[in-house]
Image (spheres, rainbow, N blue to C red):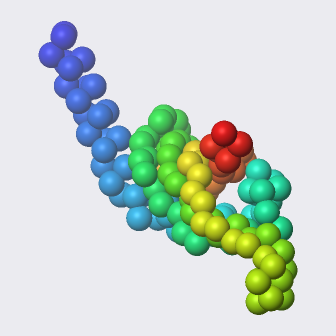
Amino acid sequence: MLEVMKSILMMIEDLRERIKSHVGGEISDVLITEFVDTTFDDIDILSTHSVVDYSQVDDHYVDSICSDYVKISVDGTVFYNLQWGSGSDMKNGIGASMSESFPYQAIIHAKLQDFKKLELSEAGINIDTDSWYE
């Protein structure tokens, strides 16, 4: 009986790894679209203008599997260019800008019928800007 349980658990872990490998490339696409299309209040209050330079997925793992979808947890880093002042302020030397990075977390759902169809959870992306205030 113990060998059967061990075999089932190993099969589940193998399935998680296969799913993780299969959706790895698509995760970045979903996140980049969200970073470009969304204004994040936690970032918006830091400067006059903020632009995403790029984001990276540091880690992702299968959190749970249910009858409809797979829940994938994502940890990453997003890199912003923060600017204070307008474009003309920058040209006149009275504006300032700097690059900054922040960790983020997100939950993505992959439909069991088609792992290529990834959707960001309703919670969206949670960017941790606490380091800015330290």
Q: Is residue 130 above or below residue 84?
A: above
In the image, 35 versus 14, the foreground residue is 35
Farthest residue, direction top: 1
With 128 as the anchor, is 63 left or right in this view? left
Q: Quadrant of residue 97?
A: bottom right
Residue located at (64% from left, 68% from top): 98
Circle count: 0
- Position in image of residue 73 (x %, y %): 51, 42
Check the image and report above or below for 94 versus 48. below
- Asked whether residue 108 is in view, the answer is no
The N terminus lies in quadrant: top left
**Residue reaching furthest to the left:** 3
* Left or right: 57 as drawn, with respect to 95: left
Q: Residue at x 80, y 88 (%)?
A: 92
As drawn, which residue projects farthest toward the front? 93
The x, y position of residue 19, in whole percent, is 37, 49
Q: Position of residue 132 (x, y in %)?
A: 67, 47
Residue under the image location 35 percent in, 41 percent down: 16
Q: Position of residue 70 (x, y in %)?
A: 50, 44
In the displayed structure image, the side of residue 111 where residue 45 appears, left or right: right
Using the rendered image of the protein, determine whether residue 58 is visible from the camera's viewpoint. Answer: yes
- x 75%, y 64%: residue: 38
Along the line of sight, the residue nearer the viewer: 130 or 41: 130
Quadrant of the drawing holding the C terminus:
top right
